[in-house]
Amino acid sequence: MDEPKVPKVAIGCQGGGMHAAFEVGVLRAVLERIEAKTEPPFKLMGLSGTSAGALCALMVWYGLESRDGSPHKAIRLLEHFWNEFLAQPGPETVLNCLTYGALRIEESEVPWLGLYAPIFGLNPRGEIYKEFAHWLPRLGVRKKYFDLDEFLKAHCPDFDSIENPNTRLLIGATEVVNGYETVFDSDATTQKVESWHQRLPLTLSGIAASGTLPAFREAQRIGECYYWDGLYSQNPPIRDFVADYSKAPDEIWVLRINPQQWPGLPETNGEIQDRENELMGNLSLNKDLDFILKVNTWRARFEKENKDIVVEVFGENEVIVRTIKMRKDTADGLSCASKFDRSPTCMRKLRDEGYAVAKEWLAKWPGVDRYPDDARYPPDARYPADAR
């Protein structure tokens, strides 16, 4: 008698600044379940991420694939990484309060007049910004607090020794000059360009590129190309998991930290800025996921007539997409400014919620909803039913 098939699962971590702390909690719950070998089982075959989501995916992958890798090590490294990423007591806390406070002021406006004052006008390539960064260490701010390259090197010292990993890692970034949608792939050995999509070998500099917001950091140079945050192209990379359906996962779990819905029409400048950021963060993701659903529709339509051809082209099974998201009240209470709040309080709240939500979700899996239905919140006074 054949043993039941263990589903292969890939997890995609959206970018969204410090809101990715929610994903830290979710990933811990997932790794604990893998370590405990809880029934029903699944195999984690891939991770992907963009921006802060890339940092989450990286540390889980590194904990699993580096020397003496295990789910327990992945949990430890992931949480240590994020604790170190937070503002430490002293000058860093002051700097975080000033930064977050300025962004909150920028979100506010004069009542009734609709006027507001943009705060951050410093160009990361300008001399004032560079002089400011030069003085931060002398004021007691760790260099790796504001230098992502240094931070990644410090936390992934054995990165270059990882060969032939069992878990695939995809990191999304945007090539600025040519406009290439870029993925840094642990399975890639050379550059491959198709139309406006390029696939490159995974590097720490590529992961740093994924978190390069142009308002806060100079473009990441890799070879002769320059890269910005993957938010502008893939948030997170999904398509490459199904580029070869013979190797595709059975399920893709998307950790969504940019809400699909909004409780009403954004009216203030802060609300508009927040919603613009969320819509931009979801646009590329939804297109990739909708394409997977379309392929599933084609499979169901033609499988009876041409099963052998369907299996050859699209693999043995459909790819199921599922969403794990914040609770509605939590999503409503966050803003674009809070994505830059590196305080322990913000981190702890979102991490604990992610853990609780994931524990509840995993206890019901696989009997949970699928995308696109699970990407929306149930209708209520704030979230009415779709107007379709």
Image (cartoon, rainbow, N blue to C red):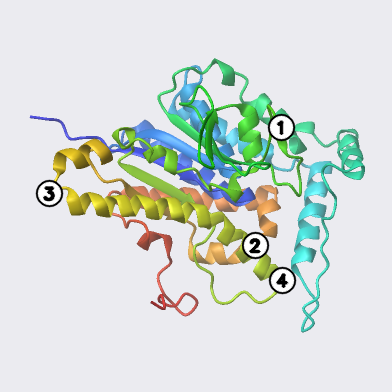
| 187 is higher (above) or lower (below) than 161 | below
Mark number displayed over residue 97: none
Query: Sequence order check: which comes first, mark 1 or mark 2?
Result: 1
Earlier sequence position, callout 4 versus callout 2: 4
Amino acid carrying mark 3 in the image: Lys
| Picture residue at 58% right of the left edge, 60% below the top | 278
Q: Residues within 10 Å of mark 3 (few under 14, many from 20)?
A: few
Q: Residue at x 56, y 55 (%)?
A: 281
Mark 3 lies on a secondary structure that is loop
Does residue 29 appear in the picture of this structure? Answer: no
Indicate the amino acid at tag 2: Ser
Badge 4 marks a residue whose secondary structure is helix
Rendered residue at 15%/42% (across/down): 307
What residue is disc 4 on?
269
Q: Are marks 1 and 4 in contact (CB under 8 Å)?
A: no
Measure how far apart labels 1 and 3 are at the Cα level. Answer: 50 Å
Label of residue 221 in the image = 1
The spot of residue 138 in percent (x, y) is: 90, 33
Q: Quadrant of residue 43?
A: top left
